[in-house]
Amino acid sequence: MNKLLLSVVFLVISMFSQAVSASAVYSYHGAYKDNYVDLRITTTFASWLTRKGGGSSKRIECLATFNENKVENLEVKYEGKTYKIKNYKTHEDKISLQSGKNLHLFDIELSYTIKATKTKITKKFTVFAGAFISKTGNNRLIFVGEKKPVTDIEKLHASQLAFKRLSFKNGQTYTYKVEGKSTKGYRTETTIKVNKGFVENRSFAELKQNKTAESISYRTLRTWTESYSDMNSHKEGAEAISMDKVYDKCAQLIRKKSRTDTVKLDFAPDDTLRQCRLFNRNRTQIHKNLSTKIISITFPKVSNSSL
């Protein structure tokens, strides 16, 4: 009866710099809505630096709108504490949660009682957002509930959550390898290394297949490697972006799907993304600039399987 809706609102970044001070504010917004409650959460991280020193702060604000004749006892549980949520009418009705250590990824529980039936409804969510330090406005905050993913975009969000759990566990440091094809038709492999959320290295290899009756092997034709200082100096290879941005591009691709198109969406055993491609009714791949085919993702402490 209660349908989970995923809401995506883009990252808002405000940055100021002066000769004597500098500050940055990163704010994320997300929403959950069912037949009874509209819940909205904003997480904000701020940092500043002056001649006298620096500091930082973080905040989670929660507000909800609902029909008081139908719903009562609206509460949110977070970090072992229970917060009673008011029906939002003015800014004073916002509830500030005592923020934990990680605003990137946290669990929250919503509960309320339907007056007519005295039925208590409980919804558990994981909330996640992109890295706070970002040069783009693509990051977002998403609620993932208990509902089994059905649509392609829901499956992608569930996969992104699985990736983020592994990424945060390993300090947002990992390496992933992308399969492609050169202008000559040979197989290519682009290896992208991400350190603490930032791409620091990209390497490329063009491979020629040697096929016999007994086996298939590849001979390396040429290679190149880029460091941070000369990143994207080559036109070939997969784009030098983080996996978060790969997921963002895949989401854009899914939203371009028409009724006659087919999305090819595959995941590894650990639920991380392996393939995101779109084909038209003639089985021709389209929007290749948003597509990806990942061979493997490797973390320093936990390595997942290759496909």
Image (spheres, rainbow, N blue to C red):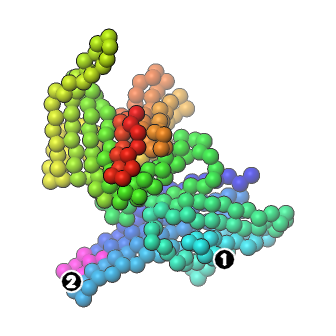
| Label 1 Cα crowd, 10 Å radius (few <14 / some 14-19 / many 20+) | few
Q: Would you place residue 140 above or below residue 57 in this image?
A: above
Residue placed most toward the observer, 294 or 254: 294
Q: Would you place residue 84 above or below residue 199 in this image?
A: below
Q: Return the residue found at the far top.
A: 213
Look at the numbered disc 2 and give the secondary structure of its residue: loop
Q: CA distance from mark 2 to mark 1?
A: 42 Å
Marks 2 and 1 close (CB-CB < 8 Å): no
Name the kind of residue labelled 1 in the image: Lys
Locate residue 150 relative to residue 188 in the image: left or right. right
Q: Residue 208, how many percent across, how many down?
A: 22, 22
Q: Quadrant of residue 135?
A: bottom left
Q: Residue at x 21, y 37 (%)?
A: 204
Q: Which residues are magenta?
A: 17-23
Determine which residue is flagged by label 2.
20
Residue 84 circle label: 1
Locate residue 223 relative to residue 255 in the image: left or right. left
Name the kind of residue labelled 2 in the image: Val
What is the tally of numbered marks visible in this picture? 2
Q: Residue 187, how many percent across, how many down?
A: 27, 27
Q: Nearer the viewer, mark 2 or mark 1?
A: 1
| Label 2 Cα crowd, 10 Å radius (few <14 / some 14-19 / many 20+) | few
Q: Is residue 166 visible?
A: yes
Q: Residue at x 66, y 60 (%)?
A: 123
